[in-house]
Amino acid sequence: MRNFIPERMVRATGKMMRMNIDDGDIFIGEYANGAIGSIQTSFVTVGNYPGIEARIYGEKGAIICRLVEEFGVAETVKIATADDVEFKQVEIPQRFYPTGGHPRESWRSLFYANLVRDFIDEIRDGGSRNQGNFADGAWVQEVINAVEQSFHERRWVDLPLAR
């Protein structure tokens, strides 16, 4: 966790101020099944931002999903398999876009339109399907708290956190 740009313009005041905000961070996690993963975020790295990129690797293949506007395209998905190891871009099926949405639409409207669509679908359809509930949000916050604790104490931290 690091603050790379401590002095910055505050839009509301138009003045430069010292800000103690993490501009970038990275963490490594080890899962109960022995797999490892890493998460990195940054508002100051070179490249297009703000965006979301998820990479998932398994024994039979891998996928890279990106929600970041580059070259006029807002979302991309690339897939590789054990038999064809180079990532190849695949078309995202229309059913994954909100009504009227398309790959050349701004990521901002795609992202929020999908959130709203999922929220309305969950209310309309009922049932147990959801894109996240309070328990999911609480678990995410606990992971964030564990990362911060690990950073400050310079050690591995187990989940769930001790109460």
Image (spheres, rainbow, N blue to C red):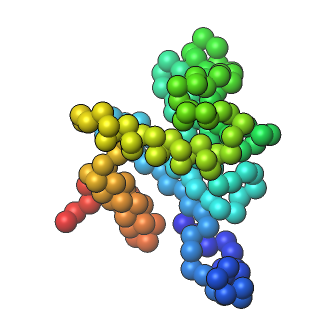
Q: Is residue 75 left or right of residue 150?
A: right
Viewer-proximal residue among 159 and 13: 13
Viewer-proximal residue among 44 and 9: 9
| Residue shown at the point (69%, 63%) measured from the top left | 44
Which residue extends farthest right? 71
Q: Is residue 84 left or right of residue 97?
A: right
Viewer-proximal residue among 81 and 99: 99
What is the number of callouts on the image?
0
| Residue shown at the point (72%, 36%) measured from the top left | 104
Asked which quadrant contains residue 12, the reply is bottom right
Q: Is residue 73 left or right of residue 110?
A: right
Q: Decide: is 158 above or below 66.
A: below
Q: Position of residue 94 (x, y in %)?
A: 58, 25
Quadrant of the snapshot with the N terminus:
bottom right
Quadrant of the snapshot with the C terminus:
bottom left
* Residue 91 visible (yes or no): yes
Which residue extends farthest left? 163
Q: Position of residue 65 (x, y in %)?
A: 59, 35
| Residue shown at the point (32%, 37%) measured from the top left | 124
Q: Position of residue 116 (x, y in %)?
A: 46, 46
Q: Position of residue 71 (x, y in %)?
A: 80, 40
* Residue 139 visible (yes or no): no
Q: Is residue 153 left or right of residue 102?
A: left
| Residue shown at the point (46%, 40%) measured from the top left | 117
